[in-house]
Image: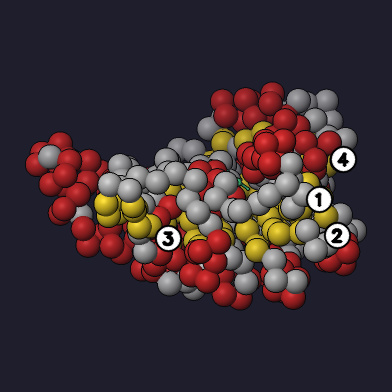
Amino acid sequence: MIDIEHVRAETPACEHVLHFNNAGASLMPAPVFDAVQRVLHEENSVGGYEAERRASEDLAAFYTEFAGLLNAEADEIAYVENATRAWDMAFYGLDLRAGDRVITHGSEYASNYLAFLQQSKRRDLCIDIAPSDRFGQIDLEGLERLITPKTKLIAITHVPTQGGLVNPALDVGKVARRHNLLYLLDACQSVGQIDVDVKAIGCDVLSGTGRKFLRGPRGTGFLYVRRKVLQQIDPPFLDLRAAVWTGPHSYELADGARRFENWESFVAGRVGLMAAVRYARQIGLGAIEERVTMLAETLRQSLGVVKGVTVHDLGQKKCGIVTFQKAGVEPSQMAEILRANQINVSVSSLPSARLDLGERGLQSLVRASVHYFNTENEIDRFVRAVDEI
Ligand SMILES: *Cc1c(COP(=O)(O)O)cnc(C)c1O
């Protein structure tokens, strides 16, 4: 059981905002904000390098905390400044050649898909889009049928940015293993709200961000790369943290996933993200997932009975992201009115989800994303506010 009163007390903004924008950027718990502030304060009082030295224990804990969170090894974790660049470090480092095929799904994140488009032009790759099943999630048989001897990679998004869908990542992992394909999972919206275990899922690479359901600071992200596939990814950029300059004509890549990092980084943010992972693990990912699922389901049901509202989430298994429309109200207008009432939501629109929203004939949706510190009382208030608009 989560002590809701306690976690809300440690989230001071709860007092004056109703925050249903946890898929955009969640609210940092006090220990996370304090950790960031402590490092910034030290940078200001003793110097940047000196502050980093003082934070060395926390910086080392970054790797062990993430390893614990994801069921990985500490040297399989890299700090990267956001999820997009983390994903890029893996994707752009793969040895994909003309005629090679990559399988993805309509729920793929826009930035990843832009990288597919760019690389399919540059390297003559073919991008295959696995069909959806009747729930809107990736269809496993359809996926398997797409696999050819030229297929090199399955790259999908666990939870899309634009809806409650949770793709069956574990079953996709089984397909990837069976066909000996590399498996790259964008877990940006799942880590922090769902108990994600890289060994159970069987993904080779996983990327995520700090600010969303992990409740870390902005401008932080991470990458997991399974030891076994390290040799298959040549980092697209090197610097003197990612590699050692061993002679005038030689270098050696750093050990483990560190080769995907770079030297200069947001030290306070790294410490803050470590504190966020520690905080989430103390609460327990199982308890978090259970509460988020329950709150989101309550929100869907309550919204579903409001006149003019349609809920649009796909998926057999759904998460903390709830998307909807109200007849006669533009989603952006709805978000603006809600914001004026200290209620935070986002809007997902076609240019950020062309394959998915395009296929469903949707221009944009209001996205309300709950976290464990939200309450049923807030859901009631939210639904009333939507009803009145
Ligand atoms: C937000 C998001 C990203 C990008 O994360 P950044 O940290 O902003 O780069 C990637 N994938 C999904 C599914 C997202 O929702």
Query: What mark, if any, has residue 359 been given in the picture?
Result: 4
Q: Could you tell whether 26 is left or right of 254 in the image?
A: right
Distance between the Cα atoms at labels 1 and 4? Answer: 16 Å
Residue corresponding to mark 1: 128
| Rendered-image quarter of ligand 1 | top right
Residue corresponding to mark 2: 146
Q: Earlier in the sequence, mark 1 or mark 4?
A: 1
Q: Earlier in the sequence, mark 4 or mark 3?
A: 3
Q: Is residue 47 visible?
A: yes
Instruction: For the residues labelled 3 and 2, say whether their Cβ atoms are less than 8 Å apart.
Output: no
Residue corresponding to mark 3: 257
Distance between the Cα atoms at labels 4 and 3? Answer: 37 Å
Amino acid beneath label 1: Asp
Instruction: For the residues labelled 1 and 3, say whether their Cβ atoms are less than 8 Å apart.
Output: no
Q: Could you tell whether 159 is left or right of 350 in the image?
A: left
Distance between the Cα atoms at labels 1 and 3? Answer: 28 Å
Q: Earlier in the sequence, mark 3 or mark 2?
A: 2
Q: Secondary structure at mark 4?
A: helix
Q: Secondary structure at mark 3?
A: helix
Amino acid beneath label 4: Glu
Amino acid beneath label 2: Leu
